Image (cartoon, helix red, strand yellow):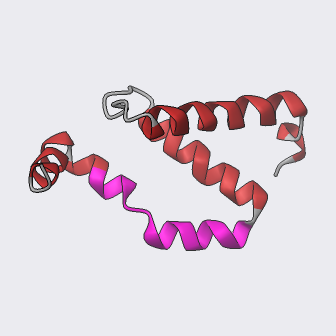
Amino acid sequence: MPNTLRKRKTLSKRFNRIRHLRNRVFHHESVWYWQDLVQHHQDIIEAINWIEPALQDLVMTVDHFPATYQQGVGEIEKKLKRFC
C-alpha cells in the first residue's frame, strides 16, 4: 500500500465502502444500477492487493465481474429465470 494512502482515515473509508456494498448484496438488494459499481469493484481489487498481493492474482483468475457487467443486466435476468 502506498505510504500516501496508509492512513487510518483512508483505510476506514475504503473498507466501510466495501462493507456497505457487501451488506447491500447479502441483504438481496439490487446494486446493479449503482453508478459507481465499477469503481467499487476496482476498490475491492486494490484493497485485496494491499492485504496480500498474491491473493489479487488468484482473485483476478476467478473474477467474472467485468465480463458480466459488460453483458448487462438482461443476460443476468435470463440466467436467473432458469432458477425461478
Q: Which residue appears at 20% of the width and 44% of the height? A: 72
Taking the image as shown, residue 83 lies to the left or right of residue 48, namely left
Q: Is residue 52 above or below residue 11?
A: below
Front one among 76 and 70? 76
Task: Identify which residue, 1 or 24, lies in the foreground.
Answer: 24
**Magenta stretch: residue 58 in it?**
yes
Q: Position of residue 1 (x, y in %)?
A: 81, 52
Looking at the magenta stretch, what is its main secondary structure? helix
Identify which residue is drawn at 12% across, 48% down. Answer: 84
Question: Residue 9 is drawn in which quadrant?
Answer: top right
The correct choice, above or below, for 40 with respect to 49 in the image is above
The residue at 70%/35% (across/down) is 14
Q: Out of 10 and 29, give the one closest to the viewer.
A: 29
Residue reaching furthest to the front: 84
Vertical arrangement, residue 71 with respect to residue 27, above or below:
below
In the image: residue 4, left or right of residue 58: right
Within the magenta stretch, is there residue 44?
no
Residue at image coords 28%, 53%: 68
Direction from residue 60 to residue 33 in the image, left or right:
left
Q: Which residues are magenta?
A: 53-68
Q: How many marks?
A: 0
Q: Position of residue 75 (x, y in %)?
A: 14, 50
Is residue 81 shown left or right of residue 1? left
- Which of 5/30 is in front? 30
Residue 19: x, y in percent? 62, 36
